[in-house]
Every structure is written in structure tokens, then in C-alpha cells.
Image (cartoon, grey):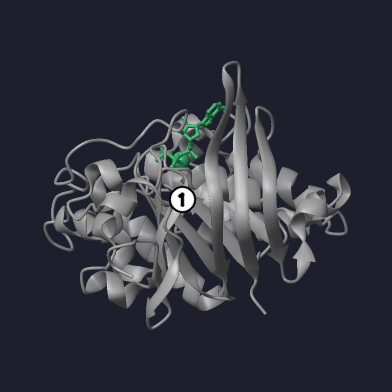
Amino acid sequence: MSLLQVENLMVDYLTPDGALRAVDGVSFELKRGEILGLVGESGSGKSTAAMAAMRILGPPALITGGEVLFDGRDVLRMSAEQLRRWHWREISIVMQSALNALNPVLTMQEHFLDTIAAHRPELSNAEMLTRAAELLKMVDIDPRHLNSYPHELSGGMRQRVVIALALTLNPPLLIMDEPTTALDVVVEREILKRVLQLQKEMGFAILFITHDLSLLLEFATRLGVLYAGRLVAIGPTEIFRQGGIHPYTQGLLQAVPQLRGKREAFKSIPGSPPSLKKPPNGCRFHPRCPLVEERCRKEQPVLKHVQHGHQVACHVRT
Ligand SMILES: Nc1ncnc2c1ncn2[C@@H]1O[C@H](COP(=O)(O)OP(=O)(O)OP(=O)(O)O)[C@@H](O)[C@H]1O
Ligand SMILES: [Mg+2]
């Protein structure tokens, strides 16, 4: 059974000038211990999809369709109390704005104790402190920083703390939404390396969200590519390493000069993503697609299996 299964998820933002569908029929699954990368340009719906699946998205967002199963349980029908018990223990998220996620007036110790006390009230204060120190060490931070305030730590250290907090209760699934974008490349690498080591040791699955496809090629088990709220390709990372099949994926990959080179993603694809207020008919990528045919302008392509578990939504390529 999948750990997380998202089927045909639809999420709208109810704006003053009407509803805007930010996630339009997105399906993906995550097995235990697997790393699924979700990639797409800014505004493609990555954060919305992840936060909706986790049920942490409030108004003006509204889940208008689909199904989310976690370990077989129906997430969209969970009560507030069920969600409270599910979050942190079984699923946690390092948010896109993680660097600001720490409360400036609380020490590291207070952050950890708040989280632990909320979910493991049976532990004594001493046990909670031991656990907090362990968690800091786990992300290579000296436990003496338990008494530090967020402003006393560097950006990289704060990000490590946020990751440790997310792992406090040993959840089987960690969602990381652009966890390292605000950091410089060297710090990003170090943190990523540590997270991947922890993932191997502890065995949690990761849903890793980024606009940086080259990064995902290095460590994701499988990859999904979002374009204007829809998945255009999903499958094993190997097919993406070989260049991908969907014209959009291919464009993204051509924009990646080399695995560890400078970030220049998306520059080689002319044009920009459509407005979700009035998306193009048919395939949403058609105005930018070098292979566009007549039916691409009219019919919406659906995901079809092409090879080795790789699915692509493209009239021309399937
Ligand atoms: N509160 C909101 N009200 C209205 N529209 C919103 C709101 N939040 C997001 N959107 C729209 O939903 C779409 C998807 O946004 P989302 O933040 O999920 O994209 P993303 O892929 O995570 O982008 P980024 O890479 O910039 O984080 C965007 O077009 C965005 O403008
Ligand atoms: Mg986002």
C-alpha cells in the first residue's frame, strides 16, 4: 500500500473576481522510504498541492475534488482532532518560508519542548530536553544552542533547526517545500547531504518540492513535473536523466547546463506560464511548445503510460 496517495486533486482559490483552479486533477503516490520530487515553475501549484494534501491550507483555498489517502486513511474526511494527531507524528512539512518559521522570542529549547509536549505529554521535562539535544545533534548543531534565540543562529543553522523540528516525532513522511532556496549553494549542499543521510538512517519518505530539476535528478526516486496546475509527466528519475519525454520536461532539462553547474533552469523555454485565471484551452503548454499540433490547442491531453512506469500528458509524444 502507498504511504500517501493523491488522486485527481483539485484546489481552487476563491478570489474576488472568481475561482482560480491552482491544482487541476493532480495524482501522485509516495511509497514508504521513497523520495518523490515535484518540480515546476513559480505558480505551477506545487505548494498548493502539497499543503492541500496535508490539509493545512485555509481560505481562500478550497479543495474542490479528489481523494487523499495516507496509509489507507481518508485524509479529506479527517476531523480536526484526527488531523492534529496525524500532523507531526506521521507527516510534517518544512515550509517554503522556513527561515522565518521560528518564533523570534523563543529559544531553540522552547521550540522543541512546545512540539514534543504537544504530542508526547507522557515524557518528563528531562526526557524532553534530552530529546531536544539529540535532535539538534542530529542536524549537526551543538546542543549548547538550545538556549539560543533564532537571531543568534545563521540562516543555515535555522534551517537545520526547522528540519530537526519536523523530524521530532519520527514521521514516516517529510514534505520539504523549497527547503534550501534562500541559502547559498554550499550551505544548501551540506544541509541536503545531511537530510539524505537521515533519510537513509531513519527511513522516512520525502516529498521534495523545488523549481530546480537538476537538484532532483541527483537524489529523487521519482519525479513529477507540474505545469500551470497540471501534472505533465511523472515517473522514475532515470527517464528524466535520459532527457525526458514531454516537450516541457525536455525544455527544462536543456535549460540545465550540467548536473552541478550554475542554475539557469527555464531560461531556454521561450514565453512564460499562463495565467490560471484564463488558462489556454487544450494542452496548457501549447503556446510555448515547439511540437504544437492542431489538437493540442483543443483537446486536453491526459497522462498516459509510455515506458517503465513513466507517464506523460502529451498528444504528440504518446
Ligand atoms: N492566497 C491565494 N489567493 C489567490 N491565488 C493564490 C493564492 N495562493 C496562491 N495562489 C495562486 O495559486 C497558484 C499556485 O500557487 P503555489 O504557491 O501553489 O505555486 P508554487 O508552484 O508553489 O510556486 P512557487 O515556486 O512560487 O512557490 C499561483 O498561480 C498563485 O498565484
Ligand atoms: Mg511554492
> Toward the viewer: 152 or 120?
120
Report the residue that reaches farthest toward the bottom: 308
Q: Residue at x 17, y 56 (%)?
A: 256
Q: Quadrant of the N terminus?
A: bottom right
Q: Which residue is located at x 45 percent, y 45 percent?
A: 159
Question: Vertical placement of 255 versus 152: above or below?
Answer: below
Foreground residue, 70 or 283? Answer: 283
Q: Is residue 295 left or right of residue 59?
A: left
Determine the residue located farthest toward the top in the rendered image: 16
Residue 99 position in % (x across, y down): 46, 37
Could you tell me which residue is drawn at 47 percent across and 45 percent down? 229
**211 vs 221: above or below:** above
Q: Is residue 154 above or below residue 243?
A: above
Q: Is residue 240 above or below residue 295?
A: below
Q: Secondary structure at mark 1?
A: strand
For the residue pair 176 and 276, the one nearer the viewer reads as: 276
Q: Look at the numbered disc 1 and say if its residue's Cβ is closer than 8 Å to ligand 1.
A: no
Q: State the count of labels.
A: 1
Q: Is residue 203 visible?
A: yes
Return the x and y of residue 318 as percentages of the image width and height.
33, 70
- Could you classify mark 1 by the number of other residues whose Cα lies within 10 Å: few (under 14), some (14-19), or many (20 or more)? many
Judging depth in this view, the residue of 49 and 104 nearest the camera is 49
In screen coordinates, is 185 left or right of 33? left
Residue 171 figure quarter: bottom right
Q: Which residue is mark 1?
A: 230
The reply to whether residue 133 is in sight is no
Q: The disc labelled 1 sits on which kind of residue?
A: Arg
Q: Could you say where residue 270 lies in the image, as x and y percent from the top left? A: 17, 40
Tell me what residue is drawn at x 72 percent, y 71 percent: 71
